[in-house]
Amino acid sequence: MRTPRSSRPLLHGRHLVLAISGGIAAYKAAYLARRLYEAGSQVRTIMTEGALRFLGEQTLAAITGHAVVTTLFGSKQAGPSPHTELARWADALVVAPATANVVAKVANGLADDALTATVAAFDGPVVLAPAMHTEMWQQPATARNIRLLEEDGRCLVGPVVGELAAGDSGMGRMAEPEEILAAVAGVFDDSLSGLRVLVTAGGTREAIDPVRYVGNRSSGKMGHELALEAARRGAEVVLVTTTAPPDMPCSVEVVPVESAEDMAHQVWTRASALDAAVLAAAVADFRPADVAGTKLARSDGPPQIVLEPTPNVLAGLVERVEPGTTVVGFAAETGGIDRAVGKATTYGVDFVVANDVTSPGSGFGTDTNQVTIISAAGERTPLEMMTKRDVAGAIWSHVTTLREDGA
Ligand SMILES: Cc1cc2nc3c(=O)[nH]c(=O)nc-3n(C[C@H](O)[C@H](O)[C@H](O)COP(=O)(O)O)c2cc1C
């Protein structure tokens, strides 16, 4: 597997405002500014009063070639209305580090200093890199504010587990500058623009009677992240899902389904119009052969449920797509992923994303996943443990690379 597309072209010529708040990780913001500048972006910086306690404004001014904005009123660096001036100028805002204080203020729409007023005056993409001690990160108020930021469509990168200030370690360390740079590049990524893609999500439910079903533990999170990420990269998306997704942009058509049969119907009827499909749903392999018309009663004793195979959604899709459509399967395994290699090499897919759903931090209902990409030739590329959103990004980057190589 090739490495993801370089961030460099995506950042070239961009206007970026780097907003630095008062956490110990502020010192790393100088290196981030340098890397954004090297990637060809014009960078202007805002520093809060707290940030100025940790890092000299002269450093940022020298790196970026622009005076630093440190105050909302009486700013010599950005005129009488620095927040609106910077907001009009910027293609994206990057808040790194984002303190617990700034996270709270941005989540709640406060605008009482140059940093938060600029965020409030800006209607483009905002990337935040939270950084704080574990106790601050674990506060219910912080968790609530982070959820608000996510709901508002802010792009969050990190924090990660690692060394913190004063010899402490744990969750709350700011993501590394290279990771933040990649996230900033990501907001300009329109690599799926003009493509029509389909994603399946969730676990199917196979009826036993009008009330009960045979199902599985899939939450649908992985598929929902795939749909969101494809939309962020400019695709027109059809999301066929058994579980209710979070709010989706209007470029995502949500098609609710329940059983493998429903899912197969919705996927197959769209097959010929697709450029790419990623089938992340956990589809039942078997279903009750006879569905009782009325609810089974305990007094009738344990039922004998005879199972029959369900339609194979992935195999049927491969048969129906036009040549050139990229098809990706998922394989959720337990106790290793050897069986997934067979799926990758025999189904006629472009690649399979395999994970062992019993390993810690992976699988159903978690926010993270550790997956292995298996090529149609059976070559395995394990990815690191990462958020499902980042896994979605890695999968779409791989789809894009394959399509470019095949073009
Ligand atoms: C030594 C020191 C380190 C700090 N590090 C952090 C930090 O990493 N993250 C954080 O959220 N707050 C940190 N704080 C607290 C913030 O500086 C404080 O909440 C401040 O009001 C933030 O202001 P600002 O968000 O406007 O920059 C630290 C404070 C001190 C004294």
Image: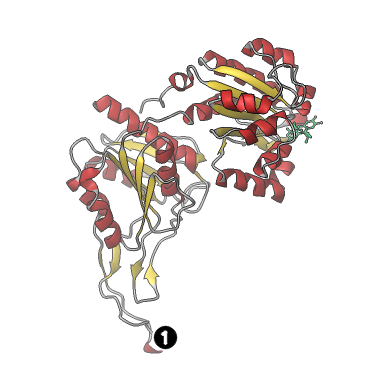
Q: From this view, report whether residue 295 is shown above or below residue 306.
A: below
Residue 28 lies left or right of residue 322; in this view the side is: right
| Image color mode | secondary structure
Q: Secondary structure at mark 1?
A: helix
Decide if ligand 1 comes within 8 Å of the CB at mark 1. no
Q: Can residue 98 be seen?
A: no
Could you tell me residue 17's position as x and y percent?
61, 24
Task: Pick whichever, 240 or 344, lies toward us.
Answer: 240
Residue indicated by mark 1 = 298
Q: Quadrant of the C terminus?
A: top left
Residue lying at the far front in this picture: please name it.
80
Which residue type carries mark 1?
A: Arg
Residue 121 lies left or right of residue 72; in this view the side is: left
Task: Pick whichever, 70 or 229, lies toward us.
Answer: 70
Q: Quadrant of the N terminus?
A: top left
Q: Quadrant of ligand 1?
A: top right
Task: Pick whichever, 329 or 331, lies toward us.
Answer: 329
Could you tell me residue 155's position as x and y percent?
55, 37
Who's the residue at 74% across and 43% down the image? Answer: 135
Residue 93 lies left or right of residue 182; in this view the side is: right
Count of numbered tags? 1
Who's the residue at 56% across and 39% down the image? Answer: 154
Residue 239 lies left or right of residue 156; in this view the side is: left
Q: Can residue 65 be seen?
A: yes
Who's the residue at 64% across and 28% down the image? Answer: 84
**Could you say which quadrant of the image residue 282 lies in?**
bottom left
Neighbourhood count class around disc 1 (C-alpha, 10 Å): few under 14, some 14–19, many 20 upward: few
Could you tell me residue 323's position as x and y percent?
18, 37
Who's the residue at 70% across and 40% down the image? Answer: 110
Could you tell me residue 206's position as x and y percent?
33, 67
Q: From this view, report whether residue 56 is shown above or below residue 407.
A: above
